Image (tube, grey):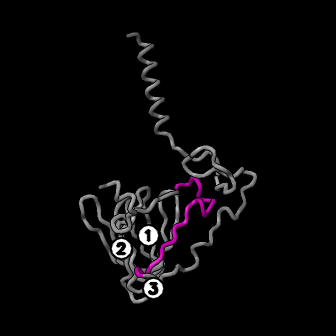
């Protein structure tokens, strides 16, 4: 093989590897969700506003400042905010949530198949934990100001272990983290799915 051809192949391989390893950063500084756009083509995320129509309020959300209604069987409430509710999150790979836990409140085991969750406790004492793929339980009592990490896709839970209501805020590493509720998947399965399994 001639040396020019070998050099060309090596150059192409190095260039290809460099392109594959390149950062996939956003093309624009920001890409708030255009809630008025009609999606003609399915894309991973939402269409962006025109840069000239971006305003400061695209980057502000107030939907997590009010406590959720914990007057239910689990004595808890989780409010997840994604780019569909908070335009400034679009294309950033983030979503946020507020968890309110009344006395003895619990968030049942669930997972986020597309996101790691950082769980920051603002008030109270909470037992937080997850189970890994080796069926090992990792749990800890966390107090005001502590952060607990739930790895992507791992079954996790939290319960109020204190003597006052607890409040936590989370940041998830996906624009659309998804929620797979174990109790919902087992006990709330609709009849159509059960018929297909039989």
Q: Which of the pair 84/192 is nearer the observer?
A: 192
Name the residue tied to disc 3: 165
Name the residue tied to disc 2: 128
Name the residue tied to disc 1: 119
Question: Are dots 2 and 1 in contact, CB under 8 Å?
Answer: yes
Q: Residue 2 is drawn in which quadrant?
A: top left
The local secondary structure at tag 1 comes to strand
Q: Which of the pair 166/71 is nearer the observer?
A: 71
Identify which residue is drawn at 69% across, 65% down: 57
Horizontal and vertical percent position of residue 172: 47, 62
Between the C-alphas of marks 1 and 3, the distance is 16 Å
Mark 1 or mark 3, which is nearer to you? 3
Horizontal and vertical percent position of residue 46: 60, 52
Mark 2 Cα shell of 10 Å, populated few (<14), some (14-19), many (≥20): many
Identify which residue is drawn at 59% across, 47% down: 26
78 drawn magenta? yes
The local secondary structure at tag 3 comes to loop
Q: In the rendered structure, which segment of residues is drawn in magenta? A: 73-93
Given the current orientation, which residue lies at the most extreme top position? 2
User: Residue 8, relative to residue 33: is it above or below?
Assistant: above
106 drawn magenta? no
Q: Residue 64 is drawn in which quadrant?
A: bottom right
User: Residue 155, relative to residue 2: is it above or below?
Assistant: below
């Amino acid at each position: 093989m001639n040396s020019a051809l070998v050099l060309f192949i090596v150059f192409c391989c190095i260039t290809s590897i460099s392109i594959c390893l390149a950062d996939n950063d956003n093309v624009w500084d920001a890409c708030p969700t255009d809630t008025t756009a009609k999606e003609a083509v399915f894309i991973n995320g939402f269409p962006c506003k025109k840069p000239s129509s971006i305003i400061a309020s695209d980057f502000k959300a107030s939907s997590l400042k009010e406590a959720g209604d914990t007057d239910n069987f689990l004595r808890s409430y989780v409010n997840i905010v994604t780019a569909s509710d908070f335009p400034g999150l679009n294309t950033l790979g983030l979503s946020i949530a507020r968890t309110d836990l009344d006395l003895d409140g619990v968030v049942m085991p669930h997972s986020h198949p597309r996101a790691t969750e950082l769980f920051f406790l603002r008030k109270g004492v909470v037992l937080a934990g997850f189970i890994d793929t080796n069926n090992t339980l990792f749990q800890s009592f966390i107090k005001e100001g502590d952060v607990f990490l739930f790895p992507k896709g791992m079954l996790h839970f939290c319960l109020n272990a204190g003597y006052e209501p607890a409040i936590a805020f989370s940041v998830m590493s996906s624009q659309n983290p998804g929620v797979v509720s174990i109790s919902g998947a087992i006990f709330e399965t609709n009849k159509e799915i059960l018929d297909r399994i039989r």
